[in-house]
């Protein structure tokens, strides 16, 4: 909960830094341009990469669909349920199987209205660390290149 003005009760938040926001998206473009061709995940564009990275760091919405049987009718129903979930999460949705069925994920919004700077900064930092750990891409080096 953000602190409030003692006189009027208005929530006091530090607005999102436009400079930090631009830096984040410059990083996404640079990471996309330098994304390893050998990596298991191959993004279609920087927006696809952004959504995938947000999901990877846990900033996502998730729907789980249990498919406890290999029976064709049960699988058909599972696929029907997955189709319904894809309609609920229309863009940049990711699906993976786990031991009990399907996991469908979509990145949460990071727009200015959703997150202030205090909430955005840890997300950006987690993505930077994830990019470096997952791919070996030097985040600061990438940003200097697009400089």
Image: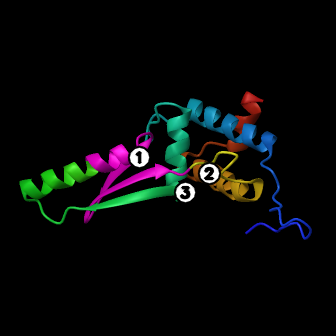
Q: For the image shown, how many numbered marks are present on the structure?
A: 3
**Taking 17 as reference, is 41 left or right?**
left
Disc 1: CA contacts within 10 A as few (<14), some (14-19) or many (>=20) = some
Q: Which residue appears at 51% of the width and 31% of the height?
A: 45
Q: Nearer the viewer, mark 1 or mark 2?
A: 1
Dot 3 falls on a residue whose secondary structure is loop
Q: CA distance from mark 3 to mark 1?
A: 15 Å
Is 105 a magenta residue?
A: yes
Residue annotated with mark 2: 127
Q: Is residue 139 above or below residue 77?
A: above
Outermost residue toward the right in this view: 7
Residue 135 % position (x, y): 54, 45
Give the residue at mark 1: 89
Q: Which residues are magenta?
A: 83-108
User: Which is nearer the N-term, disc 2 or disc 3?
Assistant: 3
Question: In the visual, does 5 lie left or right of 1?
Answer: right
Q: State the image coordinates of residue 29 (x, y, percent, origin top left).
A: 62, 32
Position of 143 relative to 65 (above/below): above
Residue extending farthest to the front is 8
Q: In this image, 22 relative to 39: left or right?
A: right
| Residue 63 among magenta residues | no
Residue 99: x and y in percent read 26, 65
Instruction: Please give the residue where the numbered disc 3 appears in the rendered image.
Output: 59
Instruction: Give coordinates of residue 104: x percent, y percent.
Output: 36, 53
Name the foreground residue: 55 vs 18: 18
Viewer-proximal residue, 115 or 53? 115
């Amino acid at each position: 909960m953000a602190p409030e003005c003692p006189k009027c009760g208005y929530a006091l938040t530090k607005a999102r830094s436009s400079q930090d926001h631009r830096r984040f998206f410059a990083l996404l473009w640079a990471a996309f341009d330098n994304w390893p061709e050998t990596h298991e995940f191959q993004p279609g564009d920087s927006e696809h990469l952004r959504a995938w990275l947000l999901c990877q760091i846990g900033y996502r919405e998730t729907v789980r669909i249990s498919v406890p049987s290999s029976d064709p009718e049960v699988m058909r129903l599972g696929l029907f349920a997955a189709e319904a979930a894809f309609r609920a999460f229309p863009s940049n949705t990711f699906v993976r199987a786990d031991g009990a069925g399907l996991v469908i994920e979509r990145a949460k919004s990071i727009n200015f209205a959703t997150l202030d700077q205090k909430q955005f900064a840890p997300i950006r930092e987690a993505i930077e660390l994830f990019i470096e750990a997952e791919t070996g891409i030097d985040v600061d080096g990438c940003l200097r290149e697009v400089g």
